[in-house]
Amino acid sequence: MVNFCLIASADLRQSPLDFRPLPPPTDDEVGVVLERIAARVQHLLKRRGLDPSDADLVRTDPVVEESPALAGISSASIRGRIALGSRAGARGWRVGDDPDAPWVLSTAPRHAHLTGFDLHANVAVPAADRARLEHLCRYLLRPAVAQGRLRLLDDDRIVLTLETA
């Protein structure tokens, strides 16, 4: 698998475009790209008033007003507590609770992780393999949530139908 660089002369009428092979990116280069992505996403969120560190974003949860029982169960889940039954309020066992367990980081080449952002740059498809190229493009361009599972209610709320309960 080879990366290519497109080389164009100042005057395209004199010489055609030329593709030249490049070496794959280094782990450090992938890290630099991820740093730029993270910084730009955070800048965009701030511009749109969605800065996660902004205290003004803390608003009343509408679920608390509409369904206090559901809000209590959800809150217990987030805090890692048992919500119902004789053990309500007790801490539940969770994967990753063992403080002595080794922290597993990816040792894969051309992979970077930074503050919740992950970048995997170790996939390459030969230009002649059109089926794999199409599969990769479809994967990259898929929506985060399948449109067929979303439905707009009359009161402007959105329902997401899960594939499995």
Image: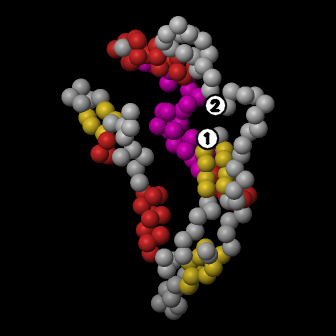
4 with respect to 71 (left or right): right
**Which residue is the site of mark 1?**
116
Is residue 60 visible to us here? no
Determine the secondary structure under disc 2.
loop
The kind of residue tagged 1 is Gly
Residue 64, horizontal then vertical, whole percent: 41, 14
Q: Foreground: 104 or 93? A: 93
70 with respect to 151 (left or right): right
Residue 58, horizontal then vertical, whole percent: 50, 21
Q: Nearer the viewer, mark 2 or mark 1?
A: 2
Q: How many numbered discs?
A: 2
Is residue 61 visible to us here? yes
Q: Which residues are magenta?
A: 37-61
The kind of residue tagged 2 is Val
- Position of the N terminus by quadrant: bottom right
What residue do we see at 75% from left, 28% from top? Answer: 99
Verify CB contact (< 8 Å) between mark 2 and mark 1. no
**Which residue is the site of mark 2?**
95
Q: Foreground: 139 or 59? A: 139
Magenta residue check for 50? yes
Q: Residues within 10 Å of mark 2 (few under 14, many from 20)?
A: few
Q: Which comes sooner in the sequence, label 2 or label 1?
A: 2
What residue do we see at 43% from left, 72% from top? Answer: 131
Residue 137, horizontal then vertical, whole percent: 45, 63
Determine the secondary structure under disc 1.
loop
Q: Which residue, as the protein is rendered here, is positioned at the far bottom?
A: 14
13 with respect to 154 (left or right): right
* For residue 92, above or below residue 21: above
The residues bearing labels 2 and 1 have C-alpha atoms spaced at a distance of 19 Å
What residue do we see at 53% from left, 7% from top? Answer: 86
